[in-house]
Amino acid sequence: MTPDELELAPGTVHENLQGVLWTEDLRIGLEKAFDYRGDVTITRNDGSQVEGYIFDRQTGKTLDDSVVRLFPKDNPRKVAIRYSEIAGLAFTGRDTAAGKSWEAWMRKYKEKKANGETQIELTPEQLD
């Protein structure tokens, strides 16, 4: 491959997980949660829940050796939870980057240009 071909490598495909209650393999769900651009709600085995943004995970050989770390929505301190302590996972927060891909942005830009707009700037949209 040439450097130009490498520059056009496909990016990560993001699924629309907003509102999904994950019921399948926990490890796969937590990997998807790590790539998710919104808050998730983790239900522990004791029934308590933590809602927040997952920023790190460390996978070990077992669920007890694996840990997910998140910024809780209602607490300034980071929280670490062992995979073995997790009973459920839900994608509860809004995916702040949904529909904001480069391709979507370019499509909107080209539509504005085709409609004759002249003061089009190359600035990103607000994420809210």
Image (spheres, grey):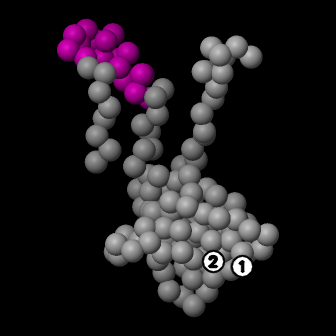
Q: What residue type is labelled 2?
A: Arg
Q: Which mark is residue 103?
A: none
Residue 118 inside the magenta-drawn segment: yes
Judging by the rendered image, the residue that carries numbered circle 2 is 82
Q: In which quarter of the image is residue 38?
A: bottom left
Which range is magenta? 104-120
**Looking at the image, is 77 positioned above or below residue 122?**
below
Q: Where is residue 95 in the image (x, y as percent from the top left)?
A: 44, 52
- Discs 2, 1 touching: Cβ within 8 Å: yes
| Secondary structure found at label 2 | strand
**Looking at the image, is 87 positioned above or below residue 90?**
below
**Residue 112 relative to residue 104: left or right:** left
| Secondary structure found at label 1 | loop
Residue that appears at 63% across and 77% down: 82
Q: Please rate how many residues cluster around mark 2, counting C-alpha atoms within 10 Å: few if below 14, some from 14 to 19, many from 20.
A: some
**Residue 120 relative to residue 29: left or right:** left
Q: Quadrant of residue 88?
A: bottom right
**Looking at the image, is 99 positioned above or below residue 73?**
above
Q: Is residue 20 visible?
A: no
